[in-house]
Amino acid sequence: MSKKIQKRDAKVSRELIITHAKALFSEKGYASASMDELGERCGLNKAMVFYYFKNKKGLYESVMREILVEIQQAIMEENKKHQTPEEELEGFIRTYAKYACAHPYLPSLLLKELSDSGAMLPDMLFSSMRQLFALFSDILKRGEEKGCFHDAIPMILYFMILGTLNLMITTKPLRIKAAELGDIEVDTCAQCDINDIADYMTDKIKLMLKGCE
Amino acid sequence: MSKKIQKRDAKVSRELIITHAKALFSEKGYASASMDELGERCGLNKAMVFYYFKNKKGLYESVMREILVEIQQAIMEENKKHQTPEEELEGFIRTYAKYACAHPYLPSLLLKELSDSGAMLPDMLFSSMRQLFALFSDILKRGEEKGCFHDAIPMILYFMILGTLNLMITTKPLRIKAAELGDIEVDTCAQCDINDIADYMTDKIKLMLKGCE
DNA sequence: CCTAATTAATCAACTGGTTAGTTAATTATA
DNA sequence: TATAATTAACTAACCAGTTGATTAATTAGG
């Protein structure tokens, strides 16, 4: 019992707000996320949001900073474990997939932000995204130098991976619905596991970087 | 002179509203798009929006219906021109890329919608997206039967293509900005032509469907 | 061909509801 | 008791949608 139960705890309140804000922003988008509703969800007065974060935009920035730092750390951590560019690439895809699936507000918020070209996040998303991309780009570069990857355009491959994984996660409810209708004979991967998707993608991307010499 | 200049023309006004609505919704998103501003942009009174479309949601649906029908037609038209699955696949990617680049509200609106799992469009986006996916799925199926494609998971490949192309289009301003900073040594494809991107993707996707037997 | 009646298109001004953000008072904790 | 955390009540701006009046175009009748 390192801490007795207390009614007032700034740290707890602050974290409560951030946690619920992640969910709310990703559910409704920035504009439709109401600070009144956020207060309610937290069981706190709405004014507390402005007490801990100066305004709505400030809260949003804190939310985005947190999730971007988190995914970046997860991937960098993972990356250290691997030696060869092939393993690193595999690790990158797997880790992103796993993390994004476990924290589905990430794909949702990221896609919303990217569909705006980052209108809401002038500097921050930006530098975080660039660092992640630099890491990815480096994997491919080392792969080319070592002769195991050919003809890679990092920017396109980066969005190929993030785009596919993010969409597969955010559209899951839609794909389940489509499968239930079943009037068109198509497989929407409604029951696919994200790890299987990541494996498939890893496989295919390796294939396309190998070439067929 | 089939028509004299007149101050009032329902068809013109309606189209004016739809045209500006496409831009406004894709710039700001559904929630932040103000009907007052839309009226202003059209040079019409806001009430006209509700005169021609019953409410904001109705307008949004009309906008989405129009753009989804357009892209669907463009792709179906193109598809008729080709014989082999390989050519069809190539045509699919190229046509989507070209159309989306020429009408950049499409990628923006589509990504916003998909990041919500189509929360705004219960039926419509849905059936339109499914038809397009069915067409794509069919190309791959025929390719497998003919023996020229291997191990294709249509749903994943579909989002791989749409995800990559949509993101490459919506993030263009971001990528240009990143290139101008230039503090990290990475190529953001800031000046890439969308046709080159489509060619690269076609190439790579063919490679990954061929396998290396 | 002109004009009166009808219909269609447009607008200014309003309404009810919501929202981000503020403030001044209140309660808990150290 | 001093300070940090919390609240209720408020404000000013905004927004979707409505209404009733007005103007332009169309049609019909003499």
Image (cartoon, coloured by chain):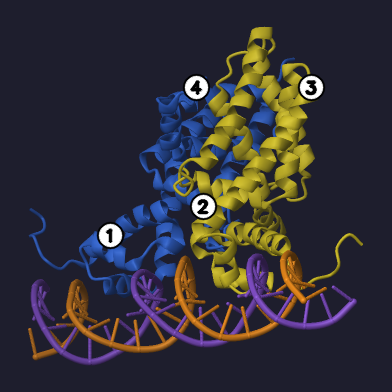
Chain colours: A blue, B yellow, C purple, D orange
In the rendered image, residue A40, in percent from the top left (x then y), is placed at 24, 63
Pair 4/2: label in front? 4
Which of marks 2 and 4 precedes in the sequence? Answer: 2
Which residue matches tag 4?
A: A187
What percent of the width, then of the height, locates residue B91?
A: 75, 29
Q: Chain of mark 2?
A: A
CB under 8 Å between discs 4 and 2: no
Amino acid tagged 3: His
In the rendered image, residues at marks 2 and 3 fall on the same chain: no
Q: Label 4: chain?
A: A
Amino acid type at image mark 4: Asp
Q: Nearer the viewer, mark 1 or mark 2?
A: 2
Front label number (3 vs 1): 3
Badge 2: residue crowd in 10 Å (few <14, some 14–19, many ≥20):
many
Separation of residues labelled 3 and 1 (CA atoms): 57 Å
Which numbered disc covers residue A99?
none
Q: CA distance from mark 2 to mark 3?
A: 35 Å
| Crowd rating for badge 3 (residues with CA inside 10 Å; few <14, some 14–19, many 20+) | some
Query: What secondary structure is marked by label 2?
Result: helix
Q: CA distance from mark 1 to mark 4?
A: 41 Å
Tell me the quadrant of the picture where the N terminus of chain B can be found.
Answer: bottom right
Near mark 4 (Cα within 10 A), the count class, few <14, some 14-19 or many ≥20, is some
Which callout, 1 or 2, points at the residue further toward the start of the chain? 1
**Residue at label 3?**
B82
- Residue position for label 1: A15
Residue A88 location, x and y as percent? 53, 31
Q: Do discs 1 and 2 share a chain? A: yes
